[in-house]
Image (cartoon, rainbow, N blue to C red):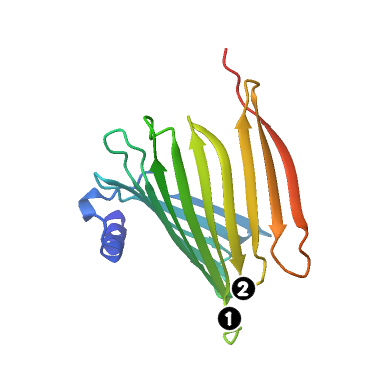
């Protein structure tokens, strides 16, 4: 069964040969019962499709009730560090569908190291997109959303992040967070979210957060 699944998956993605595929974790299976009858189940199969230059993890999952199962496929790719330089690229793709809705998600991120310590000093830019379509309303446009986020890390500490996002529901906005580590075992983050709709023009969400971290002894 393992060889059959591997031979079916590898040609689809064209990543590595079947000999390099490996089940990195045992498949997970759980079931639930109600009144002595099968009410729900969940089965997960992870596969490691990594190569010498790239990490690749593929996960197939099915869950739900026997009458209404939900299927999910998830693929995550990441560059391996080379010559001590920060791994700069990650890609994620996933699809979910059942008898009511189908959804696709994708993410792309890239890190740009700088200075004498590129693994500790870098700017990371990421883009996320997702869309969902209700199957029984085919004449409706799919619900979609996209966001772009940039973060700054200096000396291994995250200092600031800014993101822009919007979608078909009109929930455009911007998030800005500033994190400054101090000598105290805590990080202080200020996060502001503004609604870009011209009708309101007011602050939608503002938060001040304190996160405790482990102190060094």
Residue under pointer 2: 168
Residue 46 point in image, percent of width and height: 40, 51
Residue at 78 percent of width and 59 percent of height: 202
Q: Which residue lies furthest to the top in this view?
A: 217
Question: Tag 2 or tag 1, which sits nearer the N-term?
Answer: 1
Q: What's the CA distance linking mark 1 and mark 2? A: 9 Å
Tell me, yes or no, if residue 116 can be seen here: yes
Q: In which quarter of the image is the N terminus?
A: bottom left
Residue at 75 percent of width and 52 percent of height: 205
Asked if residue 126 is positioned above or below residue 87 in the image, the reply reads below
Residue at 65 percent of width and 65 percent of height: 172
Q: Marks 2 and 1: in contact by CB < 8 Å? A: yes
Report crowding for label 2: few under 14, some 14 to 19, many 20 or more residues within 10 A (C-alpha): few
Q: In this view, does 46 lie to the left or right of 208?
A: left
The image quarter in which residue 146 lies: bottom right
Tell me, yes or no, if residue 74 can be seen here: no
Q: In which quarter of the image is the C terminus?
A: top right
Q: Which is more toward the observer, 207 or 141?
A: 207
Residue 168 point in image, percent of width and height: 61, 73
Report crowding for label 1: few under 14, some 14 to 19, many 20 or more residues within 10 A (C-alpha): few
Q: How many labels does the image show?
A: 2
Asked if residue 53 is positioned above or below residue 169 in the image, the reply reads above
Find residue 169 and name its label: none
Residue at 27 percent of width and 60 percent of height: 10
Residue under pointer 1: 141
Residue 63 point in image, percent of width and height: 54, 60
Residue 191 point in image, percent of width and height: 68, 45
Q: Which is more toward the observer, 163 or 116?
A: 116
The image quarter in which residue 80 lies: top left
Q: Is residue 106 left or right of residue 21?
A: right
């Amino acid at each position: 069964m393992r060889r059959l699944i591997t031979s079916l998956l590898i040609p689809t993605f064209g990543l590595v040969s079947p000999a390099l595929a490996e089940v990195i974790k045992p498949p997970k299976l759980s079931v639930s019962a109600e009144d002595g009858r099968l009410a729900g189940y969940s089965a997960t199969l992870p596969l490691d499709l990594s190569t010498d230059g790239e990490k690749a993890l593929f996960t197939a999952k099915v869950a739900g009730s026997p009458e209404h199962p939900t299927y999910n496929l998830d693929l995550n790719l990441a560059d391996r560090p080379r010559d001590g330089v920060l791994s700069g690229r990650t890609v994620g793709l996933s699809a979910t569908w059942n008898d009511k809705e189908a959804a696709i998600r994708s993410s792309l991120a890239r890190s740009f190291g700088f200075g004498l310590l590129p693994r500790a000093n870098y700017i990371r830019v990421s883009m996320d997109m997702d869309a969902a379509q209700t199957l029984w309303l085919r004449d409706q446009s799919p619900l979609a959303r996209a966001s772009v986020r940039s973060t700054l890390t200096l000396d291994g500490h995250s200092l600031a992040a800014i993101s822009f996002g919007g979608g078909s529901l009109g929930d455009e906005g911007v998030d800005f967070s500033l994190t400054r580590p101090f000598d105290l075992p805590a990080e202080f983050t200020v996060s502001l979210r503004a609604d870009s709709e011209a009708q309101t023009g007011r602050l939608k969400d503002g938060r001040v957060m304190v996160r405790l971290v482990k102190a060094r002894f």
